[in-house]
Image (cartoon, grey):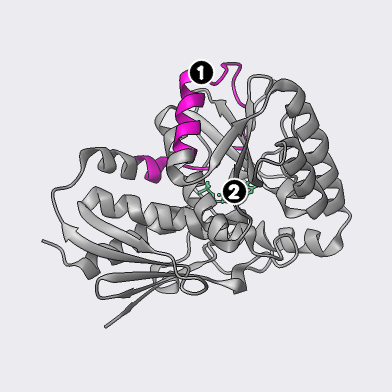
């Protein structure tokens, strides 16, 4: 029988696998007895592309969700407290029970999940999968709007404008370069293996990391891809954290259904495109992230896993 402290330390360890913008992993955990505290690490925030810390907190939210899935899988009931400010969240381990088989399955999904920048196949995302993803966003505390074709074309223009603005901003360029090579903490950032040799043909442009990687992205045009906006009612730090939890829930559900997810964050990084996205949603909420969804060829292995920071750098165990 494991103690709460051991289970929480293991949950924080599992949370290292969470997705994060540019693989910055901007989180730190402190385990104190039966409490697990989550902090944002502003040293690994993208200060140029993400000055308000929205994407940093989204990333922390994804890590929080991962930690909770790990606790569920071990049969630990828990409660999450969300203080205003720091820590961002405190997970209280409550009772140990039998391991939950469906949560164990989710833990496996979390271990295989990854960002896929290859061109998607010609197979459309089936309606039941779209529905499952929308429901997943709701469970996670946000909403997912799957865009109709005319909206996708509008999105493509926004993403192009955001990409142009970022390409012409030397500081943003330098910041991106620092996470795709350059001088950065070991165990973070994007290796060549996950960056396409050439950007694939897509309706909505993928992020141009400014380097050519080694990922064979495949031929063909992603006409079967679906594009969606993750959004919600508020635009405050607590909402961005929730958005990250919803992102993780959507991503695990997509992985379960064999669907690939590619987040596109440049349109939410810049004020003018974020406002344009909000108008496109009919001002019913605040956009957090754009997602490309698609079905990939199951016969071809997906891209490599990105590296992670060592445990000692992200988890402190205190008495
Ligand atoms: C908030 C957020 C924003 C992201 N934005 C982008 C993006 O604009 N373009 C992209 O190619 N990947 C994006 N990603 C994917 C990350 O680069 C990816 O999660 C990270 O490199 C870790 O790799 P993994 O997801 O394969 O584990 C984003 C991820 C998160 C959580």
Q: Is residue 313 among the parts visible in the rendering?
A: yes
N-term mark: 1 or 2: 1
Residue carrying label 1 = 126
Q: Indicate the position of residue 213 as horizontal and vertical percent values.
A: 67, 45
Q: Nearer the viewer, mark 1 or mark 2?
A: 2
| Residue 123 forms part of the magenta stretch | yes
Quadrant containing the N terminus is: bottom left
247 horizontally vs 43: left or right: left
Residue nearer the viewer, 93 or 111? 93
Q: Is residue 204 or residue 185 the one in the foreground?
A: 204
Nearest the eye: 18 or 286: 286
* Badge 1 vs badge 2, beta-carbon distance below 8 Å: no
Q: Position of residue 121 (x, y in %)?
A: 59, 21
Characterize the local packing of mark 1: few (<14), some (14-19) or many (20 or more) Cα atoms within 10 angstroms: few
Q: Left or right: 300 with respect to 156?
A: left
* Residue at the far right in the pictured view: 168
Look at the picture and state if 27 lies above or below 195: below
Location of the C terminus (image quadrant)? bottom left
Judge whether residue 19 can be spotted in this image.
no
Quarter where residue 46 is shown: bottom right
Residue that numbered label 2 is attached to = 233
The disc placed on residue 273 is none
Q: Position of residue 306 (x, y in %)?
A: 52, 51
Give the magenta-colored segment's residue range.
Answer: 109-137
**Quadrant of the image occupied by residue 51:** bottom right
The image shows residue 113, relative to residue 297, as above or below, that is: below
Element on which disc 2 rests: loop
Q: Does the segment drawn in magenta span residue 143?
A: no
The single residue placed furthest to the bottom in the displayed view is 319
Query: Residue 36 location, x and y as percent?
Result: 34, 69
């Amino acid at each position: 029988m494991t103690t709460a402290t051991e289970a929480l330390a293991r949950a924080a360890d599992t949370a290292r696998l969470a997705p994060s913008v540019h693989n910055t992993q901007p989180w730190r955990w402190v385990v104190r007895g039966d409490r697990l505290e989550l902090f944002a690490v502003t040293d690994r925030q993208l200060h140029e592309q993400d000055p308000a810390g929205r994407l940093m907190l989204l990333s922390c939210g994804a890590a929080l969700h991962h930690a909770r899935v790990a606790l569920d899988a071990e049969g630990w009931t828990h409660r999450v407290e969300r203080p205003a400010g720091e820590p961002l969240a405190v997970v209280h381990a409550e009772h140990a029970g039998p391991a939950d088989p469906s949560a164990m399955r989710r833990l496996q999904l979390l271990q295989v999940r990854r960002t896929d920048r290859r061109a998607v196949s010609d197979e459309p995302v089936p309606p039941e999968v779209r529905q499952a993803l929308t429901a997943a966003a709701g469970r996670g505390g946000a909403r997912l709007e799957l865009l109709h074709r005319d909206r996708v074309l509008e999105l493509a223009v926004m993403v192009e404008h955001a990409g142009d603005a970022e390409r012409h901003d030397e500081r943003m360029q330098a910041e991106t370069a620092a996470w795709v090579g350059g001088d950065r903490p070991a165990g973070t950032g994007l290796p060549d293996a996950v960056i396409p040799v050439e950007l694939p043909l897509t309706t909505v442009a993928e992020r141009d990391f400014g380097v050519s990687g080694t990922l064979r992205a495949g031929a063909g045009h992603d006409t079967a891809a679906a594009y969606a906006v993750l959004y919600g009612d508020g635009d405050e730090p607590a909402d961005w954290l929730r958005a990250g939890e919803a992102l993780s829930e959507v991503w695990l559900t997509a992985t379960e259904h064999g669907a690939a997810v590619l987040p596109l964050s440049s349109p939410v990084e810049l004020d003018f495109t974020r406002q344009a996205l909000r108008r496109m949603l009919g001002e019913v909420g605040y956009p957090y992230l754009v997602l490309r969804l698609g079905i990939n060829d199951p016969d071809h292995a997906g891209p490599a896993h990105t590296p992670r920071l060592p445990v000692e750098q992200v988890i402190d165990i205190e008495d």
